[in-house]
Every structure is written in C-alpha cells, then in structure tokens.
Amino acid sequence: MVSRFTPLLVGGVALALATVSACSPVDDDTTSGASPSATSDACPSGALGTVAAGKLTIGTDDPAYEPWFSDGKPANGQGFESAVAYQVAERLGYAKENVVWTSVTFNNAIAPGPKAFDFDINQFSITDERKQAVDFSSPYYLVRQTVITTKKSKIAGAKSLAELTGAKLGAQVGTTSYQAITDIIKPTTKPSVFNNNDDAKKALENGTVDGIVVDLPTAFYMTGAELKDGVIVGQLPQVGVPEQFGLVLDKGSKLTGCVSQAVDQLRGDGTLAVLEKTWLADSGAPELT
Amino acid sequence: MTHAPSQRQRERFAYRRRQAIRSVLLAALSTAVVGTLLAVGVTGAPGWPRVKQSFFDLDVAVEYFPSVLDGFWLNVRLFLVCAPVALALGLLIAVLRTLRGPVAFPVRVLAAGYTYSFRGLPLIIAIYLFAFGVPGLRLRGTPDVVVLGGAAIVITYGAYLAEVFRAGIESVHPSQVAAARSLGLSHRQAMRHVVLPQAVRRVTPPLLNDIVALQKDVGLISLAGPIDAIRAAQIGVAKSGNFTPYVVAAVLFILLALPLIAITDRVTLRAARAQNAGT
C-alpha cells in the first residue's frame, strides 16, 4: 500500500497519472466538492471529494469501546482511534469542527456497496479477503501481544519481562501470542497451549496458569468484559507478523491515496507512536521491557 | 539307535517344504502386485507432488522431530500410568457389577450407571470437565491438569474395560461357581480362584485392544494445556505451514503401539490354538 501511493508525493504530471491509475476504475459519483485536478495538488487541503462537501465524514460502530474511544463518544477526541481519526482529518485539512461522525456497524463498513462515510475507523484488520470489497489505508496500528492475568496471580504486579520468566503462561496454539511467549518472555516453565482463547481464559480463571498472552484488543476485551478481576500486565515488544489495523474506505475511493498519505505522515513524524503511548500504554496497558 | 524317518515320511517332509516355499513365493508376488498398484495409484494422483511436499517433507520432519519427541515423552509416561490404573478400575467395577444379592443392589446400580455414562461420554468432553471444571472448584490441593486429564482418560477407559471384564466373568459357566461353592469356597474365594483367572484369560485380546486405543487417546491430554506430541506437532504445523510434523507424531504413536499390537496378536493366536487343541 505504501509504495503504491508513494508517487503521490512526487507531484507533477506523473502524479496525476499515478492518481488516475491508483483510483481506477472510477465510479460515477455525485459527491460535491473539488475533485483532484491534473495540475494542482492531488489532495487539496480541506477540499477533497468527500461525501458531504467541506466536511469529513468518519464512520465507526456504536457503541464505541474503550480504549479505542472514550465514553462511547467518538467526537470527543478521546481514545486511540478517535485521536487518530482527528489527526488524519487535520492532515487532510479538516479542522475539528468540520469532522462529522456517523454510526456504521462493523459488517456494513466492510461489505461492498456505497458508503455513507469518507473513512471508517473501527479496529479493522487489513486482510486480502476484505480488500476485495473495500479499500484500506496504510496501517495506523500494528497489533501488539499483551500479558493478562487476574488480581490474585503472582504476576499481577509484574513490571518487566524478567519478572515473567518464572510464570506459567498460556496461549492459543499457532498464534503470535504463543510465539511471543517462546521468543520474547522465554519462561523457565513450559507454556500451556490451548485450542482457543476461551480455553486459555478458563485455565487462567482456574489458576492452572499464572497468565495468558493475547493480542491487545482481546486483552482489553477480556479484562474489561469477560474476566472477573482481570488485569493487563503489559504489552510485549513486537513479534512475528502482527495484525495491522487500517482505515476502511469505499472500494476505489478517490480519498484512499490521500488518507494513506496522511497516515504515513503521522507514522513518519512519530504522532502515531505518541498516540499509542497516550491512549493504550498509559491507559492500562504499560510496556514491558 | 537313532530315529530315521521312513522313505514315505521324507517324501511328506519334502512335499510340505515345496508347498511352503510355493506359498511364500505366491504371497510375495501377490504383495508386490498390490504394493505396486497402491504406489502407482497414490503417487500417480494429480495432487501427489503437493501432498508429498506438505506431508512428507524430510527437512521439516528433521526440524520438528526433537520438539515432537519431547512432547511424546509426556504421552508415554501418561500411558504407563493410565493403562494399569484403568485396568484395575475396570476389574473392580466389573466385580462390583457381578455381585449377587439384594444388599449389593445399590452398588450394582452405581457401577452400572458409571459404565453407562462414561462409555457414552466423549473423552474430549470428559477431559474438558476434569481439566477445566475441577480446578474451577478452587479446592485446596487440586492436582495438576495433567493428573486431572489422566484421571479423565482412566475413568473413561475404565468403563470400557469394566464391560470387557464383565463379559469375561459372565462367560464362565455358573456350574463352576456352584462347584466351587460346594467345595466350601466363599463367593469371594470362588471369584478369586475359579472365575477371574478364566475370565481374564478369555478376554485378554479385547482388553489389550482397548489398551491400544487408550495409548493413542492419551494424545487428547493436549486439550488441557500441556504440550504433548500432538500439540508439539500442531505448533510445528502452525510455524512451518507444512503438515509433516503430524506425520512425525503419527509415526511415533504407531511405533509405541506396535509391541502391544504384536502381543495382542500372539495372545489371540495362542488362545485360538488352545481352544482348538485336540481337533
């Protein structure tokens, strides 16, 4: 995705050609606002061919969950994805007051068909199957593996990887989570391996393992909604081939290139790293090193 | 004076030898033909190169052999403990089920209920109940999940073995018990010295057959969390994207079963010979 849109940064006639090829086939659309012209900037600040002229319409599901959103209000700018969305909007030239949120269910967002949003942010993993139906921006988040446990466990207060080496850990078979145990934590006790995360969670509840490793979104869900007394011990360093979250756009959207470019800029200048730290690491999922 | 076979007897020997050689040759030829047909049939299939590459990759096999073998050691230990305990449990239940008299009625009912329910309960679910349900009770001194999973295997197979033992016990003619009792033996003594030795001998082949089944089902312990041979192979498959580690585990399980299968065959053969002696 990144290399495909790199030409957009170059400018000039080549850029116009690249834009046309990147976005073809072009649907008839009734969107108002300026369309990229061959001679000017392909992503004119604040004047993209958006769903509603002069406004950037961003979709997400309702309810919107912590820590991706806060208080179920995407428009408050709180929470990781809300913050990312506003940063992307700003890069595209849409000030906070020109951002409109719309509620779209997860399945509707990734189904083929006309979209009521310019882009949708809702922890969408980028997959080849989904790319058949929708466009994805460059990834704005690489999913991290996270150790979770219960309050009574001996590793509940662990701050570093070293404090986890003596623990009995579990994970689902064949996952990056399991790889994180063997490659990063390298515990002295052989890890337990389960058919699925539900079995692993049960073993954690039963105390037959001290902690389990799951990806961060699952960690927030399990500790928040499923586990009684569940706590996140912390995030592990990146391992294996992580899942990537991308912004969803309509298939063949003219905005895909511009949105990806904005995301790339945010990653490049370190904004995404700061947001990740603020909304994920500092709000309940500290880094383990 | 040494014995010298007669001319006629030597002719008989020679004839039998010729016949034996002829049948060995015929068997070899027939096996070769069938083997060739099978080999051609399998390797000639359009998808064979792909199957060969994803199931019989020597490099992958070598890479994951140590971890699968490491997990297999758990299976072996589990088998060595579970098999004798399941046999003992099965025998005990069978004896309880064959107790006579109204006083023993509740015991008979409990024993029958046990064999009915645990022969019906899938082993996978039994392991889930034991390895995930029992620790959930949060009792002090709950054993390790390997022990709990082993208990599930023992209890499930104990039910099968109990029925086999019971069949053996009931195959002993009642007149034998009557004779034993009339000699002054108690019911217990009659069971111990007259019925059980015959019963066990009669059902040894099916018992061993169940033990062979138990031997491979110890692989289901992986459900409880420990990394046994099957789980180690599964991890290898996930890492390599190649199914060869499963084949490695399969070979190990077959090698473990071979001695027992050989014993079963021999025992069966011997029992058949004893049965047919004199005919």
Image (tube, rainbow, N blue to C red):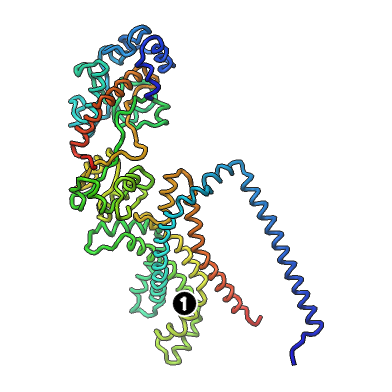
Position of residue B7 relative to residue A4, above or below, is below
Question: Given the current orientation, which residue lies at the most extreme right position?
Answer: B7
In this view, the residue in front, B177 or A74, is A74
Q: Position of residue A265 (x, y in %)?
A: 29, 22
Judging by the rendered image, the residue that carries numbered circle 1 is: B169
* Label 1 secondary element: helix
Against B277, residue A165 (above or below) is: above
Q: Which image quadrant for residue A184?
A: top left
Viewer-closest of A255 and B104: A255
What residue is drawn where x is 33% and y is 79%?
Answer: B103
Q: Is residue A115 left or right of residue B181?
A: left
- Label 1 is found on which chain of the structure? B
Q: Residue at x 59, y 75 (%)?
A: B272
Q: Position of residue A35 (x, y in %)?
A: 34, 10
The quadrant holding residue A115 is top left
Q: Quadrant of the C terminus of chain B?
A: bottom right
- Residue B239 in the image: x percent, y percent? 42, 45
Q: Nearer the viewer, residue A237 or A148?
A: A237
x and y, in percent, of residue B72 in the image = 43, 59
